[in-house]
Image (cartoon, grey):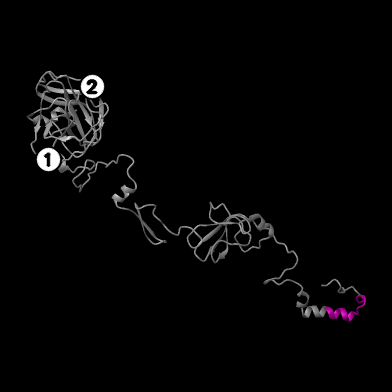
Amino acid sequence: MPSNYPTQTDETPIEGQTLSDAVLAIETDLINPTTGLAAKAPLASPALTGSPTAPTQTANDNSTKIATTAYTDAVKGLPIGLTGATAATRYVGGTTSGAPTSGTFAVGDFVVDRSAAIWICTAAGTPGTWSTISGGSGGGVTAVTAADASIVVGGTTSAPTIATGTLDVVATQHPPAAAVAMNAKKITGLANGTVSTDAAALGQIPVGTGSVNQGLKAATLIDIGVVSGTITLTAGVQYFFQINVPYTITATNYLFRTVAAASGLTSGYLGLYTQAGALISGSPTANTTTFAAATNYTLSMTSSQTLTPGTYYVGVLFYGGTPPTLIGVNAGGLFIGPTSSAGTLAGNGRALTSGSGQSSLLASVSGTPALVNTLVAIGLI
């Protein structure tokens, strides 16, 4: 009951009010109670004024309870996500294209533009610093381009395909920097080689490069052990006999056979030459000999030589007197066809000569070597 209503013990009306007025006021409130409650907030959608208060809930309380400013201040910055998501982030809207250009944003805010790019604020500010994580006009991966022809790019921007080029293209673009191991596998379908740097197909490789029981690593003839022809060379003339090395070898000696001793000979020399006509350092015989007997000769090089696959020439020179008679082949017209050039042994001639009246091996070929049809059997061991 209002405090200004008279009590049952009151015998007089409130000051300035008759008893009948007081009774009338009480009757009015009892008959129409909403008049007294008009100033109270309704339960449904109350429009509160001033600074209403409420209890502060526990952080991360995902319910319909009222959150106070104290609650929001406590949880501001905490991520709302699965365990392990320890940094705050929030979706703050979208743009037509690109990152926001106005407004103030925090680190972790992100927007989605209409070109399918997602932009994330990486440094807070107005508007802050933004980076994109997907394609679209905003950036990201918009094309895939091969660095060279060894990679072939196809497909579409959204679904590119990448494949290697053919092996010849890859090898041209990226030549091997070291030996290539074949993992104990064969190379098949190999065409016959045509130059000294080509690989040889099995059908091109002779049964042997020399007499097996003599341990030859390379020789001027396939098997010098079965050659029976005899060759007499001219003193003072340097001869060059072609020798093909099919694989990398290390040679330390020359092997050949005389069938008749030399007469009055001053000395004899052997040395290895490149196709360019240069004497290989360390390849000449370490000492000279007069070849006084008919026998097998093994003459040591000055130092062992590692020879890579290719074509070489054994230079032979006898000086003074009559040279020994050697085992070899008088080929007749067999060697017709090769050519010779000035200052080189190139041209694929199997037997050539250079100069006359010489007393020591040439350091390099001079003039144009002459082709001859005489081939001495010499091996490398």
Kind of residue indicated by mark 2: Ala
> Where does label 2 land, which residue?
286
**Of the pair 94 and 304, the residue shown nearer to us:** 304
Residue drawn where x is 12% and y is 40% of the image: 336
Q: Position of residue 243 (x, y in %)?
A: 18, 34
| Mark 1 or 2, nearer chain start | 2
Q: CA distance from mark 1 to mark 2?
A: 34 Å
Q: Indicate the position of residue 220 as horizontal and vertical percent values.
A: 15, 33
Mark 1 or 2, which is nearer the eye?
A: 1
Question: Disc 1 designates what residue?
Answer: 336
Side of 365 where 171 appears, left or right: right
- The answer to whether 140 appears left or right of 54 in the picture is left
Q: Which residues are magenta?
A: 11-25
User: Residue 110 at what x, y percent from top left?
Assistant: 56, 59
Tag 1, which secondary structure?
A: loop
Instruction: Residue 232: name its quadrant.
Output: top left
Residue 79 visible = no
